[in-house]
Amino acid sequence: MNIKNGATGIVYSENDGKRYFLLLHRVLNWEGWEFPKGGVEEGEKPGEAVLREVSEETGLKQLKLVGKIPGKLEWAAADVKYIYDVFLIEGNLDEEVKLQEGIREHDSFEWVEEEKVIGILTHEENKENFRKALELIGG
């Protein structure tokens, strides 16, 4: 089995005392809601990769790496095992989101209020990492 290393970013922003999290609706290979993610390129550190991937997939530039979530996001598809580091990233709710053009990986996005995120995320692993992210930011 081949191994692919990557990083996923749990992006949040605050407005009027509420926290919002950026979710992407995936349509490539499967359909559902997730956080931005992608592979680590050669010579790149996971923290660099997650900022690059979030920016590529969302167009966001005002990103601040807040911290790393304990553990990894792991899954297998076909003959590939994916092992991703998970990061908490502060974004800006007022910055325009522009989904990546070319590769149609996602067809929509939504800034979701903190208390609604668990009910929207598709995979349990993302829900667990979201809970860890809340602990990291004191939520």
Image (cartoon, rainbow, N blue to C red):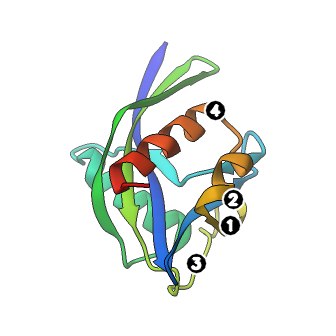
The quadrant of the picture occupied by the C terminus is bottom left
> Which residue is found at the position 66% from the left and 47% from the top?
118
Q: Point out the tag, 2 or 4, that comes first from the N-terminus.
A: 2
Q: CA distance from mark 2 to mark 4?
A: 19 Å
Res 116 → quadrant = bottom right
Q: Under tag 4, what secondary structure? A: helix
Observer-nearest of 51 and 42: 51
**Disc sitting over residue 61 in the figure:** none
Q: Under tag 2, what secondary structure? A: strand
132 vs 53: above or below = above
Observer-nearest of 59 and 34: 34
User: Can you identify the residue that label 4 sits on?
Assistant: 124
Q: Point out the tag, 1 or 3, that comes first from the N-terminus.
A: 3
What amino acid is at disc 1? Phe
Q: Can you give x and y, in whole percent of width and height, for residue 136 in the image?
A: 34, 49
Q: Point out the tag, 4 or 3, that comes first from the N-terminus.
A: 3
Res 88 → quadrant = bottom left
Q: CA distance from mark 1 to mark 3?
A: 8 Å
Labelled pair 1, 3 in contact (Cβ < 8 Å): yes
User: Can you identify the residue that label 1 sits on?
Assistant: 109
Within 10 Å of disc 1 (Cα), the crowding (few <14, some 14-19, many 20+) is some
Q: Point out the tag, 1 or 4, that comes first from the N-terminus.
A: 1
Q: Can you give x and y, in whole percent of width and height, for residue 75 in the image?
A: 55, 25
**Disc sitting over residue 106 in the figure:** 2
Within 10 Å of disc 2 (Cα), the crowding (few <14, some 14-19, many 20+) is many
Labelled pair 1, 4 in contact (Cβ < 8 Å): no
